[in-house]
Amino acid sequence: MHRSLVTAAALGLAFSVGLSLGDGATQTATAAVSPLQTDEQNTISVFAAASPSVVFVESTATRRNPWTAKAFEVPQGSGSGFIWDPKGHIVTNFHVVQGASALSVKLQDGTSWPATVVGGDASKDLAVLKIEAPKAALTPLSRGLSSDLRVGQKVIAIGNPFGLDHTLTSGVISALGREIEAVNGRSITGVVQTDAAINPGNSGGPLLNSQGELIGVNTAIYSLSGASAGIGFAIPADTVSRIVPQLISDGRVRRPALGIAILGDHVSRRAGINGVIIRSTDESGPAHAAGLRGLTRASNGGTELGDVIVAVGEHQVTDADSLFAALEAHKIGEATTVTVLRDGERAKVDVDLGELR
């Protein structure tokens, strides 16, 4: 195979090799090391730009000696996170900080800072921490969009798997619109699936595009062994950009609500009902004001079915998860139409959404 020679002055990568010839003379040949490929250069530049924004999150929990009742701190776990803004806000997963009595954040420069929890949302597995590091030590991560992602697109994950700080893995987007279960049992929809290696300790770290922009927060792997099996999941950046500012300003996520109590999905399935059964309505809530009905006591002592929600706006509702997802597509105070099954017939009811308490 023909290989062109490049001078050391041009690349700084050439080396000389002395070859002994049969006549005793020595010939010096110059062999050039191949330059980095374009994709390699991109990966290197993304890591160089983004790694200062990635942090190592460690948590401890308080335990009590059952014999002496003396309290002591023990390591609880670790994960990753990234710098959100120059004010010291750090984004990570909710499950990374859940149950911690103390937290610390280690920056790329090796300094560690005590962290406090500003807010958390178990339903989206996101949490925001705050450290009092100097502004000069804080490099916020560039943020991108997840709405225009495509399957096959290159992605890069940076985190601290198994406690090994600032580890890079790369791959592609394997699928979009996946659904995973949050720590509170709620479904997280619209999740990004990737084959970039995600291992324990990567949780809370960023998933980046080839521009080095945040497109997701690594949150889970699908593996029986607990190690990467080529199926990792990330909370999409659009969800992160919607949730994090609320956590910073309010410490929680404000969500629209109907002001109802519902029966479990197992009850609906057992009754052959494809929708959400309203058990009762809050007398001070929007559903009650709009005339939605819950269960009532029949004259014979039995229970009469009220309304069954089958749609909110344009979103179909088949179970509790789809009801929550449909409500989250709206804003607090927004007027929407709730479609219900009432006495065997479909009915539309206009409701001004309230706030979940």
Image (cartoon, helix red, strand yellow):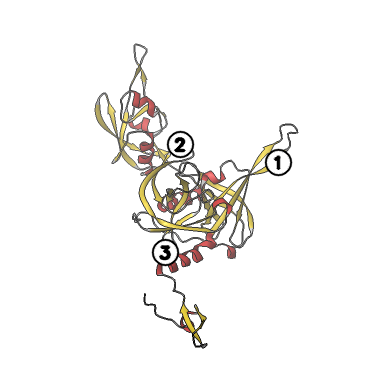
Residue 157 located left or right of residue 175: right
What separation in Å lies between label 2 and label 1 (alpha carbons)? 31 Å
Residue 211, disc: 3
The residue under label 2 is: 185
| Neighbours of disc 3 within 10 Å: few (<14), some (14-19), many (20+) | some
In the rendered image, residue 311, in percent from the top left (x then y), is placed at 30, 36
x, y (%) of residue 79? 55, 50
Q: Is residue 346 left or right of residue 154?
A: left
C-alpha distance separating marks 3 and 2? 34 Å
* Relative depth, front residue between 269 and 167: 167
Q: Secondary structure at mark 3?
A: loop
Q: Is residue 280 visible?
A: no
Residue at image position (30%, 25%) is 272
In the image, residue 333 above or below residue 48: above
Could you tell me the amino acid type at mark 2? Gly
Dot 3 or dot 1, earlier in sequence: 1
**Residue at mark 1:** 72
Q: Quadrant of the N terminus?
A: bottom left
Residue 33 coordinates in the image, percent (x, y): 46, 75
Mark number, residue 276: none
* Amino acid type for the residue under numbered disc 1: Phe
Q: Is residue 348 left or right of residue 21?
A: left
Residue 5 location, x and y as percent? Answer: 42, 81
